[in-house]
Amino acid sequence: MTMSANGVRPRRSLKKALTGIEGFDEVTGGGLPQGRPSLICGSAGCGKTLFAMEFLVRGATQFDEPGLFVAFEESENDLVENVASLGFELQDLVDQNLLQLDHITLDRSQMDEAGEYDLEGLFVRLGFAIDSIGAKRVVLDTIETLFGGLSNEAVLRNELQRLFGWLKEKGVTAVITAERGAGTLTRQGLEEYVSDCVILLDHRVNDQVSTRRLRVVKYRGSLHGTNEYPFLIDEDGITVMPLTSTTLDHVTSEERVPSGVAELDQMLDGLGLYRGASVLLSGTSGTGKSSLAAHFAHATCAAGERCLYFAFEESPSQILRNMRSIGLDLRRQIEADCLRIVSARPSHYGLEMHLATMLKEINRFKPSSVIIDPITTFISAGSAADAQAMLVRLVDLLKERSITAYFTSLTPGNGEMEATEIGMSSLMDTWLYVRAVEADGERNRLLYVLKSRGMPHSNQVREFLITRQGIRLTDVYLGPQGVLTGSARIAREERERADSAAAKLQAQKDQAMADRRAEAIEAQIAVLRAQLQAERLESWQIQQNREALELEESASREAMAKSRGSQSPVRELV
Amino acid sequence: MSHSDGETKMPNSANPSSDVAEAPGDIVEVLTEGHVLRLFVTGSTPRSLRAITNLQAICEEHLAGRYTLEVVDLYQQPEQAKQNNLVAAPTLIKSLPDPVRRVIGDMSDEQQVLVGLDVEPI
């Protein structure tokens, strides 16, 4: 038995034939076993015939391998018509000898059995058809019908076993489809004979939502994914979703991309988001999540890249109108093929189908950024656990492709986190949270960066304004009751402005007063200085006078002494 | 119609209409009364030979002079398999009288062969 493996690697030992069916070759690591029969089983309407037909058409058109389609149930005309809706032009291929259709009917009412027989007629028929166009691929759809046409089951079983061996000898890669039986893969136990590769298709309806799934039940000699892979059938045929990449080896980018709001880029290290990052934007309803997402889309397109917008709540025209009202003209970008808006009701398909459709759109449009608005609606298309599993895969798929992804998430008003968010948060590189605050009869929005891996980011709460010119983030005011937003913030700003004006005026006044006081003092100083000058002058004059007096005194004393002679020798002796 | 005589064996000489060999396309007109039968076999396996022998015996016994039998070897004319919508071998196709019926097998069950030929057992 093959070992189960989630990672599918191609093995060189077994030759495989690429089917060309999108995703299937990845799941099986290269397609169906070449030159061997494979069994495709499933219940009615699961897509067996389509799978088989696409296998042939792709073989003929892409791999230059002509194919033979043996229909036991549908007529050639029915087949041509049925697959025309998938864009397969069978008649063209038939005309080019790349395809041959053969309708085999067995009408028991017109047939009697009289003795021994075998299915050599079928062998001759197939052999002739295979040789006539050089078929490399053969489909038998649905060979079990023979059991209804022929009564000798033992012969049939024997012959079918021989047929599968014969096909192998012929070296054709064959697909044998079979209806699923009760408790068995096929009604007639064909899996016992076709043992190399068994693929099971399934079509399940849960809560009125249908999901198609494919599983490789058995693939002898090859590793294969054992998971159930969802697949979808649309105008391009079958798309199988190779899911859950188990490795986390996607390339991370150092490159930064703008978020579309300059102030938000500022909060994110001044540079914006990392390319390939997953951004979760959660908030209560009406907080402007879609608007922010639209800004991001706009920024992507403005940078000349492509953005794919999955809208699960609004139609494209509605988004265009709403965004125009806030100054974002997305119409031009749609016309320039930069932006693509895909709208679908979440309940329209099952989750896997959503994932498959989205992947398909992504592969086709090749965007550099993707918006999913909102992810929470997926819960309505499945259970919370399923939604989370699907989102995990989606994030992985986007990361693998280095696509920057923006997920919006609606949270209930009570501040609780949605279940998906708890599961999603660890996957997200950047988590923005928009909250509405009600105060003073107003409802205002606040935005903050809950986390942002790999970059320093602002811890500030910003007020989130949606204006006619788009989104703006402004600083909030912290008051005693917490942050101030909206009118309260404006009032506070006004008050501050008024306060500061008054203060300025007061200062001017104060300065004038002080100046005046200083002037007065200076005047006083001048007066004093003048007085001082006068005093000094007076003092000088007094001194002059005194000196003059002293001079006079001494002159008169000398004159007296001369006149007295030596009248005073005692005194002189002293 | 594909009443090619190319490689077919025509073991039955008791054909009441001498025109058949020359104008096979006219068989329908000519043999309004008789059985037009074709037996498809795959080579000369014992089963094929058994089918031919058995069928001839039954025809001679019940439809003597009132049938044409063409034996087609699918190995020689493989295109006949699709043209006649064949799966099992040997297969006998009774194209006339209406309705077209088929009998598969080595024709060893005479009763079933007669049912297929719309012939009342004598």
Image (cartoon, coloured by chain):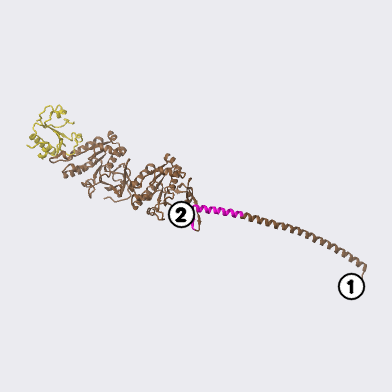
Given residues A442 and A179, the one toward you in this image is A442
Q: Is residue A483 magenta?
A: yes
Q: Is residue B13 magenta?
A: no
User: Magenta part mainly helix, strand or loop?
Assistant: helix
The Cα–Cα distance between marks 1 and 2, rounded to whole angstroms, is: 118 Å
Q: Which residues are magenta?
A: A481-505
| Residue A303 shows in the view | no
Q: Does B89 appear above or below A287? A: above
Q: Which chain is brown?
A: A
Query: Which amino acid, mark 1?
Result: Val
| Residue at numbered disc 1 | A570
Side of B53 where A179 appears, left or right? right
- In the rendered image, residue A424, in percent from the top left (x then y), is placed at 38, 52
- In the rendered image, residue A282, in percent from the top left (x then y), is placed at 42, 51
| Residue A153 shows in the view | yes
Q: Secondary structure at mark 1?
A: helix
- In the rendered image, residue B23, in percent from the top left (x then y), is placed at 15, 27
| Residue at numbered disc 2 | A438
Q: Does A111 appear above or below A552? A: above
Q: Quadrant of residue A50?
A: top left
- In the rendered image, residue A76, in percent from the top left (x then y), is placed at 25, 37
Q: Which of the image's four quarters has the C terminus of chain B?
A: top left
Q: Colour of chain B?
A: yellow
Q: Chain of mark 2?
A: A
